Amino acid sequence: MVEKETVINLYQNAKKQYAALGIDTEDALKKLEKINISLHCWQADDVAGFETPDAELGGGGIQVTGNYPGKAKTIEQLRSDIEKVINLLPGKQRINLHAIYGDFKGEKVDRDKIEVKHFQSWIDWAKKLGIGIDFNPTCFSHPYADDGFTLSSKNEMRRKFWVEHVKRTRKIAAEMGKQLGTPSVNNIWIPDGSKDIPVDRNTHREILKKSLDEIFAVEYPKEYLKDSVESKLFGIGSESMVVGSHEFYMGYAVKNNKLLCLDSGHFHPTEQIGDKISSMLQFVDGLLLHVSRGVRWDSDHVVIFNDELQLITQEIVRCNAIDKVNVGLDYFDGSINRIGAYVIGVRATQLAFLFALLEPTEKLIKFEEDGKNFERLAFLELLKNKPLGAVYDYYCLNNNVPVGEDYIAEIQKYETDVLSKRAS
């Protein structure tokens, strides 16, 4: 077990090292405290939801690999898991729900019929925890998505079904924001696309634009609701064409002043979404970032503290855009302990933000403007050797959550006491 005195002593040493570079660690920690990370509920149950007792994931190229024992099978279990995760994390989190996670109490409710009452128990639960909720329409795992098209479908009956579904999720999300006192981000992602080379891409995109215009016809107060649209490069079953491409949604978001969602697993493997942040912030009021880790394709691996994550957080901080960017996790790994997957991902994201906040940005920009590129590069390399971990451990200590490797034993105990009993 990590000793409190050791953590404090190491932090005091780290504080001096950063101060020598003109960096105030206390100020960085205050800024870190303001960054709320939205926990994706679907990591806890492999994107099954609670529409039916034996729901199966389908459509849109979404796949969860692994069958690690102990996944959540009820709303109570999922909430218990999320609460455990929150208790192991410093700072403030949010919860991100898909529409299939409603509290339907055994009633069959199709997606064009969902109401606030089906999510009121979630709102009450979040209020008890003092956290906000983000909310998403679920345009997959449904018979009306089996042909690969939803909001862009040429089948008018199916298109209207999905338009009504998304309209209802916006209304529910706005009520969540109103009751919880923090705006809910309603993010639209659809799986629409073609496995093989299509001829008529244009009509599907015209239809999608029409559907979005209908969905957004009703406006809600911004203090209750933030609207977001999310693109994807390809998926299994939509390798040749995705209707909601980056260019489509970028144009729509700019023209209609919506949040643009950038998912780090939804682009070409050599693209870095960190590079897109400063460009998009010139034209939209805000962004939604879905932090994931694609390996060879959009495989949604658990987020780790790597170069891509560093660039994302550095760009947010360097753009002074912490208040303009909403951050949520988006991955689903069923091959390892799911609680551990959450905690690793959030801590990695927080660590990356702290790394960015402990950068002497003004000094580096001055080097850049003066053409002192050697000095700029030297300082960027020196920062990699600074005791970042000591500052983060101190942050955990001040938040009364496990420090360092101590969270591993906590998760192992939860697996023994709770998760293992579900498997049996």
Image (tube, rainbow, N blue to C red):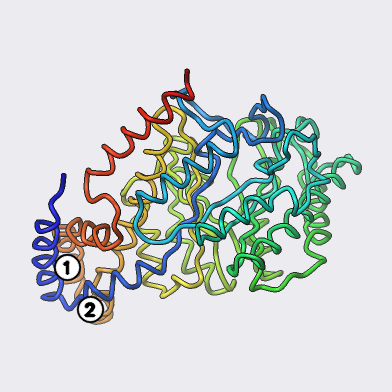
Which residue is painted at 73% across and 40% down in the image? 104
- Extreme top residue here? 424
Q: Are marks 1 and 2 in contact (CB under 8 Å)?
A: yes
Mark 2, Cα crowd under 10 Å, few <14 / some 14-19 / many 20+, is: some
The number of discs equals 2
Q: Position of residue 122 (x, y in %)?
A: 62, 51
Residue 175 position (above or below residue 100)? below
Q: Earlier in the sequence, mark 1 or mark 2?
A: 2
Q: Secondary structure at mark 2?
A: helix
The kind of residue on which mark 1 rests is Phe
Report x, y in % for residue 413: 32, 33
Label 2, on which residue? Answer: 363
| Whole-percent x, y for residue 83 in the image | 46, 47
In the image, taking residue 78 as reference, residue 177 lies left or right, namely: right
Residue 370 location, quadrant: bottom left
**Mark 1 → mark 2, Cα distance in angstroms:** 9 Å
Of residues 134 and 328, the one nearer the viewer is: 134
Say which of 217 and 129 sits in front.
Answer: 129
x 37%, y 34%: residue: 414
Q: Position of residue 5 (x, y in %)?
A: 10, 59
Residue located 70% across and 63% down the image: 175
User: Outermost residue toward the right?
Assistant: 157
Q: Quadrant of the N terminus?
A: top left
In the rendered structure, which amino acid carries the disc numbered 2? Lys
Instruction: Please tell me the numbered disc located at residue 258.
Output: none
Q: Residue under label 1, please give it.
A: 379
Above or below residue 104? Residue 15 is below
Q: Residue at x 38, y 50 (%)?
A: 87
